[in-house]
Image: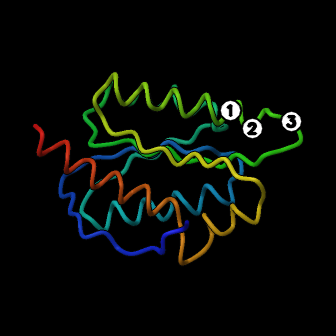
Amino acid sequence: MLRKNSKSKTKASGARFAIVASKYNAEYVDAMVGAAQREIERSGGSVQLVRVPGAFEIPIVAARLAKASKLSGIICLGVILRGETDHAQQIGNAVTSALMQIQLQHHIPVIHEVLLLENAGQAKVRCLSKDHNRGMEAAQTALEMAEVMRQLG
């Protein structure tokens, strides 16, 4: 079920986030990146953007950022559209597993919005719509998780 966008009330003054985003399916991913950046910056945080060729390349960059940086969170954005083979599912599964391992290993929130979608229509609704943007949702999750981690010390 899609949740309608609403602005986050979480403040992130001084918090640093990274966005790792795929260049593939740029129309959709760029819209998510823009929404995520605006939400983080509106809350008082800063954003480092790193672009990679495709979804499969996102985890290696997220791992490097998690290891090397003092970040409050890493937001991973991409769009995988299913085709005639199971390649998209394989990529989606691999990315999901890798991102989970990164956050557990490095104790940093890694927000997973690498979307595995059936078609361009689903991508338009989730990435280009004013009412629903998974980039904004990812940023809000990152803000909330940064606050949870800060409280835990």
Q: In screen coordinates, is 67 left or right of 114?
A: left
**Where does residue 119 sit, x and y in percent of width and height?**
78, 57
Looking at this rendering, what residue extends furthest in the front direction? 1
In the rendered image, which residue does mark 1 sit on?
Answer: 91
Q: How far apart are the alpha carbons under marks 2 and 3?
A: 7 Å
Residue type for callout 3: Thr
Residue type for callout 2: Ala
Q: Residue at x 58, y 45 (%)?
A: 114
Q: Nearer the viewer, residue 3 or 67?
A: 3
Q: In screen coordinates, is 104 left or right of 56?
A: left
Q: Nearer the viewer, residue 51 or 6?
A: 6
Mark 3 Cα-neighbour bin, 10 Å: few <14, some 14–19, many ≥20: few
Q: What's the mark number on residue 88?
A: 2
Q: Residue at x 35, y 60 (%)?
A: 140
Q: How far apart are the alpha carbons under marks 1 and 2?
A: 5 Å
**Where does residue 63 sit, x and y in percent of width and height?**
43, 26
- Tell me the SS state at disc 2: helix
In the rendered image, which residue does mark 3 sit on?
Answer: 85
